[in-house]
Structures are given as structure tokens and as C-alpha cells.
Image: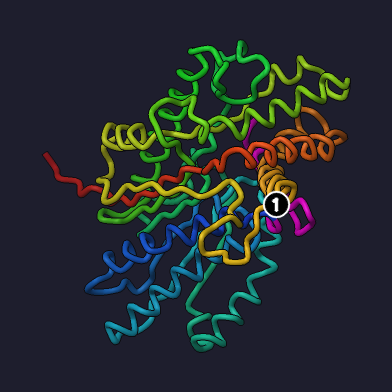
């Protein structure tokens, strides 16, 4: 079952998601203007007494509450502009049951204290945060109960590994060498999952409610593109190296595939239009280097092959290790990601490959009785 093993590395150790989620933080920062514009447009004339919202796939670590603080900042600013009373905020943090919710909850007192000092004690008391364990491929909330949904870096994870891809030998995801049926199976699984996600959220959100989603995609229609496949091809290559050393059984590699998909923006748009519950307000893409530290805004960055390789390997390890351990055991993890870091560093010396990110905003359509 994917739900039992799809989780980020817990805690705050060196390989934890909390210590290796700078890429995800950068994505949140890049998407923030769209998030702000959406909230401001929603409440341009008036704010509700209680603003109810959910973050789907919240994970754990510093980024979880970063989204909440961004929402609180925008709402505070709107209240200042409209000279109105602060609404209560009811925030639901959702992720799979294996998520490290304890780390999130332990950070809440500090979070509330921080906002109390910055904007007054009363403001911190207006925000009520609740954890909601469960898959967003199931119903999570009562009908028409929320104003706003947000999800960042979660919807590229599928509900399950696509069926019928046992011939994808030597690969752990779509790869240049994968048979045609593998690409077809991955696309069909994403179509099913994303359509289901939209239908479920349409039942839980009010008419006119808004949705902001950010997830990994690819730059062109061809799924063999480097920004789609290469990151996982290098990990498969690292696993095959360990198999050559006798540390991994090659047949185990042949039976491991990731429940993951990088959609093209045209695929996303088509699914939303076909499902029919939401109008697309905006759909954009932006690129971030594999090593998010390598950014034009980071004046101190100096490319160093080994360090960049380790940075990228640590990010991938933080999100993929629980799945890998469940299939291969934990004895090989250090050696696997050491080898992977070397391959990534060598690749980045030749070519600076980027993650393609899709960010979109949608509005729940109004129901017009026939």
C-alpha cells in the first residue's frame, strides 16, 4: 500500500525532510505572489467571520507553517486596508497518517508566540490549527465546508503505482528506455487520480471557493524529457551499481516503480476541463535548479560539484527513502545516496538541469439548476 510508505523522513536529523526541504521552501516563495493575489481577490470587498482553509500534503518541518503564516499575513493586510475586524482562521493541515504530525504540533506554541509578538497577542488567538490525517484521494471534509484549498509539491504523487508495467525492467519510473505502455499507464493513473482529487474537493468547497495548487511538471509534451525522467534515471543507475556489487538483488529493482508523475501543463488543463467542477483562473510554469541553492538571488552561491550533488541527493533521500527502505531495506541507503550524489554532481558539471513547476489557481463553478 502506497499510503503506508509514502511519507517524508521524520524528525530533524541530517537526512530528515525538515533539514532538506529548501527546494520546497523556494517553490512556496516563487508561488507566493499568486497565493496572495488569489486571497486578495476572494475577499476584495468583505472577509468571512471564519475563514476555513486546508493545506493538502502539508508534510512536516518549517515549510508546513510557512504557508499558514503567509495566509495570516495576507488576511492581516486586508483587514488593515478594509479597516475591519480580524476573522477567525480555521486551518486544516492534511497529510497521510504516516506523516510526522508530532513535529508540527510541537512547533505550534512557538508559531503562535511569534505572531503574537509581530502583530499582537489577539491575532495569534484567532488562528485554530488542526491535523487531518488521510489521503487527499479520499473525502476529508464535510460538504461545502471550506473556502480555500492549497497544496504544494504533493499532487505529483499518485495514489498507487500504475498497473501493467512489470516490463519496466531496470527502471524505477518512466525513463527513455521504458516501453511505450509504461508512459501510457503513468498518464492514465494521473488522469484518474487528478480527476478524483478535483471531484472530491468540489464536494467539500463552497461555490466560488478557490484552489491554489503547485506541483512538479515537465517542460514539453514528450515524457522522455530530462526535466521529467533524469533525476530518477540516475537513482536507478545507482541501484544497478549496487546490484553489480551484490548489495541489491537486480530482480528487486525490476519490481520497484515510483507512484509519481510529472504532468505536462496541457495534460493538467485538459483534465480540469474534462472533470468540469472548476474554472481555471491562472496556470503558469516556472523553473528551479535541481540544487535550489543555485539561484540568482543567492549571491553567496559558488558551484562545487560534490556539494551540489549531495544537496540534491539529500532532497531526494528525504522524500523517497521510506519507500526505498520498505522495498530494499535500510542497509544500503548510505551507499546508495553516496553513489547517487556522485552521479548528480557529474551531471550538473555538464548541464544545469531544472525542475519545472506548475502553479494554478481555480474557482469552484457555480451550480445552475437546469
The verdict on residue 4 being magenta is: yes
Can the viewer see residue 4?
A: no
Whether 283 is drawn above or below 49: the answer is above
Residue 250 position in % (x across, y down): 78, 16
Q: Could you classify mark 1 by the number of other residues whose Cα lies within 10 Å: few (under 14), some (14-19), or many (20 or more)?
A: few
Residue in the image at 32% along x and 61% along y: 38
Whether 354 is drawn above or below 75: the answer is above
Q: Farthest residue in the front direction?
A: 350
Residue 218 position in % (x across, y down): 45, 36
Can the viewer see residue 311?
A: yes
Q: Which image quadrant for residue 317?
A: top right
Question: Which image quarter holds the C terminus?
Answer: top left
Q: Nearer the viewer, residue 228 or 319?
A: 228
Q: Nearer the viewer, residue 174 or 90?
A: 174
Residue in the image at 25% along x and 46% along y: 279
137 horizontally vs 22: left or right: left
Which residue bears the numbered disc 1?
304
57 horizontally vs 217: left or right: right
Please say which color scheme the image uses: rainbow
Residue in the image at 66% along x and 65% along y: 105
Range drawn in magenta? 1-19
Figure disc tally: 1
Residue 227 position in % (x across, y down): 51, 36
Whether 193 is drawn above or below 55: the answer is above
SS state under label 1: loop
44 horizontally vs 2: left or right: left
Overall secondary structure of the magenta section: loop
Q: Which image quadrant for residue 243?
A: top right
Question: Which image quarter holds the N terminus?
Answer: top right
Residue 197 position in % (x across, y down): 42, 39
Residue in the image at 36% along x and 53% along y: 211
The verdict on residue 171 being magenta is: no
Amino acid at each position: 500500500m502506497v499510503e503506508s510508505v509514502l511519507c517524508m523522513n521524520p524528525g530533524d536529523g541530517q537526512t530528515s525532510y525538515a533539514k532538506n526541504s529548501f527546494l520546497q521552501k523556494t517553490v512556496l516563495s516563487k508561488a507566493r505572489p499568486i497565493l496572495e493575489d488569489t486571497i486578495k481577490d476572494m475577499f476584495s470587498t468583505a472577509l468571512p467571520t471564519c475563514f476555513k482553509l486546508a493545506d493538502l500534503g502539508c508534510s512536516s518541518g518549517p515549510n508546513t507553517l510557512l504557508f499558514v503564516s503567509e495566509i495570516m499575513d495576507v488576511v492581516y493586510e486586508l483587514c488593515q486596508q478594509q479597516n475591519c475586524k480580524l476573522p477567525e482562521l480555521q486551518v486544516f493541515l492534511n497529510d497521510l497518517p504516516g506523516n510526522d504530525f508530532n513535529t508540527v504540533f510541537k512547533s505550534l506554541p512557538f508559531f503562535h508566540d511569534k505572531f503574537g509578538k509581530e502583530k499582537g497577542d489577539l491575532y495569534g488567538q484567532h488562528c485554530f490549527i488542526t491535523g487531518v490525517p488521510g489521503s487527499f484521494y479520499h473525502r476529508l471534509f464535510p460538504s461545502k465546508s471550506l473556502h480555500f484549498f492549497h497544496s504544494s509539491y504533493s499532487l505529483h504523487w499518485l495514489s498507487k503505482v500504475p498497473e501493467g508495467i512489470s516490463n519496466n525492467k531496470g527502471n524505477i519510473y518512466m525513463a527513455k528506455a521504458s516501453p511505450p505502455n509504461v508512459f501510457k499507464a503513468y498518464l492514465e493513473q494521473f488522469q484518474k487520480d487528478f480527476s478524483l482529487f478535483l471531484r472530491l474537493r468540489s464536494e467539500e468547497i463552497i461555490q466560488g471557493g478557490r484552489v491554489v495548487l503547485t506541483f512538479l511538471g515537465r517542460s514539453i509534451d514528450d515524457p522522455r524529457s530530462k526535466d521529467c525522467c533524469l533525476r530518477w534515471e540516475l537513482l536507478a543507475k545507482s541501484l544497478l551499481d549496487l546490484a553489480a556489487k551484490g548489495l541489491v538483488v537486480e530482480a528487486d529493482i525490476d519490481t520497484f516503480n515510483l507512484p509519481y508523475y510529472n504532468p505536462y501543463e496541457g495534460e493538467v488543463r485538459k483534465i480540469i476541463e474534462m472533470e468540469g467542477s472548476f474554472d481555471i483562473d491562472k496556470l503558469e510554469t516556472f523553473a528551479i535548479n535541481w540544487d535550489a541553492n543555485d539561484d540568482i538571488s543567492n549571491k553567496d552561491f559558488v558551484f562545487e560539484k560534490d556539494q551540489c550533488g549531495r544537496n540534491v541527493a539529500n532532497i531526494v533521500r528525504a522524500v523517497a527513502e521510506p519507500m526505498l527502505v520498505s522495498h530494499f531495506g535500510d542497509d544500503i541507503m548510505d551507499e546508495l545516496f553516496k553513489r547517487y550524489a556522485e552521479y548528480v554532481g557529474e551531471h550538473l558539471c555538464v548541464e544545469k538541469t531544472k525542475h519545472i513547476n506548475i502553479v494554478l489557481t481555480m474557482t469552484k463553478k457555480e451550480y445552475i439548476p437546469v
